[in-house]
Image (cartoon, helix red, strand yellow):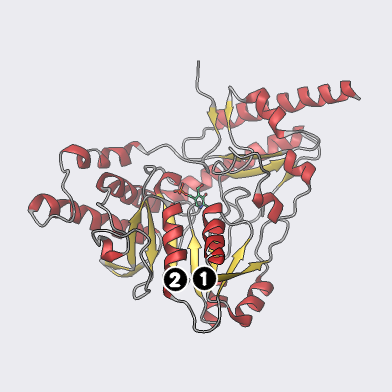
Amino acid sequence: MSSPIYLDYHATTPVDPRVLKQMLPWFSKSFGNPSSTHSVGSEASQAVKAASLQVAELCGAMIRPGVSHTVVFTSGATESINLGLKGYVQRHQPEGRPFKLGVMGLEHKAVLDSCKSLQQAGLAEIRPLQVDACGRLDLDDLKTACSEGLDLLVIMAANNEIGTLYPLAEIGKIAAEHQVAVFCDASQAAGKVPLDFENWGLTMLALTAHKFYGPKGTGALIVRKGTQLSAQIHGGGHQQGLRSGTLNVPGIVGLGEASALRKLEMGEDEVRIANLRDKLQTLLQAAIPGLIVNGAEEARLAGNLHISLPNTPNDALVAQVAKDLAFSTSSACTSGLEASSHVLCAVAMKPELQRGALRLSLGKQTTEAEVTRAAELLIAAYSRLQEKLAEKV
Ligand code: PLP
């Protein structure tokens, strides 16, 4: 049986063979613990240092050549987000008033649930930030929120469902005018769009290797030099006490290599991916009247095509094509749950459009033949469903 066409690159990506090649020696040949003071350990600690510079370079977090803002390695973006948000809020509690977080309702659950847990612990209040139907942040509302007093602005770089990109240069400027610290979840944007941690004035940035052809289970939190955080994992005091635990050297080397490759190659790759995405969109739009493209069409991830098919329950459509196509009807992190997408709710999408929503996401390995075939399969399944529905009437 041949494998299905993979159109779920927002859920995860395959490890680039060049990344895997760099990782392999660190499992059993150069297996040292970076905390050990002997030569085997120092070989590993140098590899970790090199990876931290590669990650910082990808995110524009260099202070000067060879020196970057702090890169804390974690088990992925969920942990980076928990460390960044909880660690910052716990450390920066204001006197006599609650800490104020500005957050959009369409952030990833790792962000929303971290904020909620801080709220439930009585450590923070949440000021929801307004978005429009395409998921774009209302910058006037952001200005109002900042001028009313925010302690931390929480903003994703790109949405994981509808693909909308956020204008971080502009957002960073507004936050800086009001001296508001900024936490950015760049999980979907890192390695796909240029990031400029330093010049955007970000305080923290979270990312994860498996979204850009690196290994699962490895991520990082970049922290502006001088920013204090409370650790969330205690132990041997690794990584300046910010995240105890023996470092996952093969994973970190993989994250570093994936970062270096994306820095070099993403410009060209993402143009090709956007062209394929546009082709898929055009083919579907031509055959499916009333198809709606969700998200901000003019500012979205190159590989993102989030659509709503009119009068088509997405579970029925998935059932028709599941053996040939792998894609998502919601974000993979929550699609196991019997709940509608909180992102689609946050953009106030009508329930019938939510029911017909599909997230198709393309990546580096997607081919033109796959796009053509995927469109044929989706159009045929849509037509069969429409016939069935017509028979019922
Ligand atoms: N943030 C966003 C926007 C994501 O898309 C994801 C993964 O889907 C995460 C955070 C969590 O990443 P990880 O799987 O590395 O914990």
Q: What's the residue at 63%, 81% (across, down)?
A: 148
Of the image marks 1 and 2, the number of the one nearer the N terminus: 2
Q: Which mark is residue 90?
A: 2
Check the image and report above or below for 122 versus 349: below
- Density class for disc 2 (Cα within 10 Å; few <14, some 14-19, many ≥20) is some
Count of numbered badges drawn on the protein: 2
The kind of residue on which mark 2 rests is Gln
Is 95 placed left or right of 244 in the picture? right
Q: Tag 1's secondary structure?
A: loop
- CB contact under 8 Å: marks 1 and 2: yes
- Residue 122, picture quadrant: bottom right
Residue position marked by numbered label 1 in the rendering:
123
Check the image and report above or below for 210 versus 195: above
- Report if residue 78 is visible in the image: yes
Looking at the picture, tell me which residue is in the foreground, 77 or 176.
77
The kind of residue on which mark 1 rests is Leu
Q: Position of residue 342 (x, y in %)?
A: 65, 51
Quarter of the C terminus within the rendering: top right
Q: Position of residue 238 (x, y in %)?
A: 25, 60
Q: Tag 2's secondary structure?
A: helix
